[in-house]
Amino acid sequence: MNSALAAVIGLVIAILLIVKKVSPVYSLMLGALAGGLLGGMGLEGTVSNMLSGVKDITPAILRILAAGVLSGALIKTGAAASISQAVVRTLGHKHVYMAVALSAMLLTGVGVFVDVAVITVAPIALMLGTRLRIPKMKLLLAMIGGGKCGNIISPNPNTIIAAENYDAALPSVMGAGVIPALVGLVVTVYVILPLMRNAKEQHDEYESSADAEENNLPPFWASICGPLAAIVFLALRPLCGIVIDPMLALPVGGVVTILATRSWKNTAECLVFGLEKMSVVAILLVGTGTIAGIIKASEIKDVLISLLSGWEAGGILMAPLSAALMSAATASTTAGATIASASFAQTVLGAGVAAMWGAAMTNAGATVLDHLPHGSFFHATGGSVGMSIKERMKLIPYESLIGLVLTLMSLACCLIGR
């Protein structure tokens, strides 16, 4: 059997197993095994390619585990909630959609997982929704849109691994996503949200503890110190030529957060929480790496090159297109960016695309279909506002539209910057 077709079949097997609630890690490993064997790689060759795929992403996994220090510190010290509340207070009730979207964007942008950012902002958003009679469907879409925008400029796993596989500087990849993220934020709030005129105009009463907890949160200046420190350290490479790896810069940001918020007594709790969140992603990436190794060793790249060869910008399109397809298959931004960048980075670079733009477009493309129901993001975000699966399904077209805007803007920036 053609190795490209076999790899696709392996991916389909993995998807079906994930949909059937089999562990995503084992589903991806079984799909990789099936794809390799069906593609004629033999048992030894299949296992070798699976291990090679995992080996390729091991440096990124270490950086992701290190990033847990910052993520855990932001959540457990209350810094994340403090940042989101400061944004809401500043913008006020007249700009409630922008407030919750910008809150989610900032939290994700400074290193909080996008689903955790939505869960963090959700109580504040629901409190405002109850007061202003705003449908929770619109509030959730605003938070998701803001989270997606923040995710392409953040030191989160998807950005780290895309930068790693393209051998691009992480700060450059983050910077390349700024314009698409800002445009995406504006389009989300002022174009896509108004399209939901048929949304049920009611909001369930929701008792939030946000007001009661507000006085216990650290001040905004202390909350933002850690993320700013991490960004400054990462920015030293493009600004001064001083290379500080994210494996060091992100934990330093976490330590600064703990010190600035005077939460040193909770240091162990912050570390445990961050490690728990990141270890889930790290383990998922092991399974993702196995199938990425099979895809990389297959003829899929040749098939895509053949399909896109008639297009002048075919090489450029491969980065976002492969990421969108892989994020749809795995329902995960991180897994989609991992498989796409590990499998197609060299082909995209060979087409003359700069490493920074290749990683940035892959990162943006992975947001187009990462919210499908067979992934955890779909259920975590829906659960954060008490939304049923049927209601949550109605948001999928709008989420995809937001991801498409981010991808098209990233593509446009690449074409202009060439």
Image: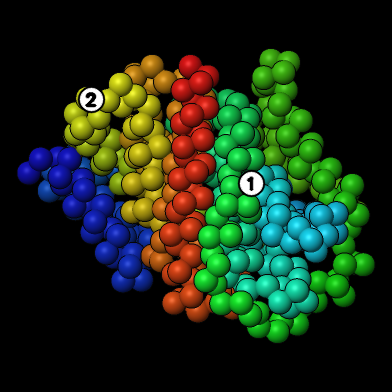
59, above or below 169, in the image: below
Could you say which is closer to the camera, residue 265 or residue 159? 159
Amino acid identity at mark 2 = Ser
Q: Residues within 10 Å of mark 2 (few under 14, many from 20)?
A: few
- In the picture, the quarter occupied by the N terminus is top left
Mark 2 in CB contact with mark 1 (< 8 angstroms)? no
Q: Position of residue 259 (x, y in %)?
A: 87, 48
Secondary structure under tag 2 reads: loop
* Quadrant of the image occupied by residue 227: top right
Secondary structure under tag 1 reads: helix
Q: Which mark is residue 309?
A: 2
Q: Position of residue 303 (x, y in %)?
A: 19, 34
Residue in the image at 82% along x and 46% along y: 224
- Structural distance between the alpha carbons of marks 2 and 1: 34 Å
Residue in the image at 66% along x and 50% along y: 105
Q: Position of residue 143 (x, y in %)?
A: 63, 59
27, above or below 160, in the image: below
Amino acid identity at mark 1 = Val
